[in-house]
Image (cartoon, grey):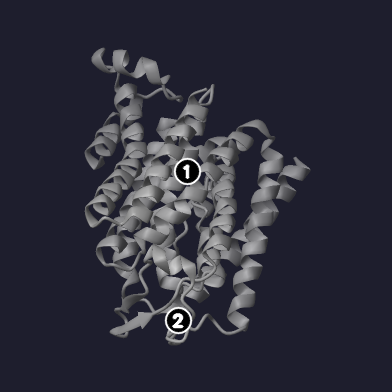
Amino acid sequence: MILGLILAAVQGGHSASNVLPLDAIWSHLTGGDPSAVLDLGILALFATPVAGVAVALGVFVRERDMAFVAITALLLVIIAAGFAIALR
Amino acid sequence: VAGAFGSVLGIGGGLFIIPSLTLFLGVKLKTAIAASIVAVIATSLGGGNVYVRQHIADIRLGLLLALATAPGAVVGAVVATQISARVLAAIFALILAVSAYRMFASIRSRPVAATAPHLSAPQLPETRLRFRSSYLETSTGQLISYQVTRVPFGVVASTLAGVISGLLGVGGGIVQVPVMNLIMKVPIKVATTTSTYIIGITAMAGAFVYYNHRPSYVDPALAVPVTIGVFIGASIGSSVLGRISQNALRNTFTAVLAVYTVQMVLRVFGIGGG
């Protein structure tokens, strides 16, 4: 994640003033567009807390703490729903 | 600098970032909000992880409250993208004023007695959720015990924190910390660190809305430098926290809120004149 940010910073000088649409990032990335790297860094940043929640879920499952397995799972569902609303 | 303060205070630093960007750099409010909310995620990651490792932040409490803050942030962000910047600025100022007053009032009354033993406390239903009940206060070497209270109320109030986070691009710590400290009786240090942990999840939920808005409010050329600065600051701030006393933390928090309030009131008047 930090690497992505550093990379993004290095590339940042010649970026567009707007992020690319999600579905366009991959094609720009393979085309060597620096702003795609930048956008990917931001998306990686978004993904990190979600990954943290997923890890916590794993820990609760291992500890058999069912109340928190439910809470954490519900949180992931809510986050996914939030994404769905944003992408609408 | 914003990151260091933000992390220490359990607020995302957004309240530093947004006025600075809009007042000094002439960035549009919503663009500043989007940059801030992205940076807030980094603050949380930089600070929150350190606190989790030091066992100050309560992850269980954090995850439970995130259930409320995450949907709140999505709602707040959706609203923010729809309403005018002027209304947003006014809300910003209002939130700051209320927060400053609340913290000021809590200083004049006695701070929550974190050290008071709660041995006789009734077995509340929420204790089944096994929240942490003590932490090691490194500045004194004491093990401080506490009991989380009024969990349902805290969850509801956290929804408000989420809405504000999404709406204004802040971490929501400015609401989240008082909610945990004053309502749920969590010691200020645990409240700030847990808040730092929560706001990563909250801000991410809100940031995605700003990111996907057409046209997107996330300007990488602005958001990325701000994020990196905040991330570095947050890492420094969180390593310092262990050596700061609770009272110093509380006083600083209040002083910072007061300064922000003046700043934003000036801003609203500035907009009104222009």
- Which residue in the structure is indicated by mark 1? B37
| SS of the residue under disc 2 | loop
Using the numbered discs, state the Cα–Cα distance from disc 2 to disc 1 in whole angstroms.
31 Å
- The residue positioned 36% from the left and 81% from the top of the image is B144
Type of the residue with mark 1: Ile
Residue A25 percent across, percent down from the top left: 34, 19
> Alpha-carbon neighbours of circle 1 within 10 Å: few (<14), some, or many (≥20)?
many
**In front: B156, or B22?**
B156
Type of the residue with mark 2: Ala
The quarter of the image holding the C terminus of chain B is top right
Question: Can the viewer see residue B164?
Answer: yes
Residue A81 percent across, percent down from the top left: 47, 33
> Alpha-carbon neighbours of circle 2 within 10 Å: few (<14), some, or many (≥20)?
some
User: How many callouts does the rendering have?
Assistant: 2
* Subunit that carries the residue with mark 1: B
- Which residue in the structure is indicated by mark 2? B114
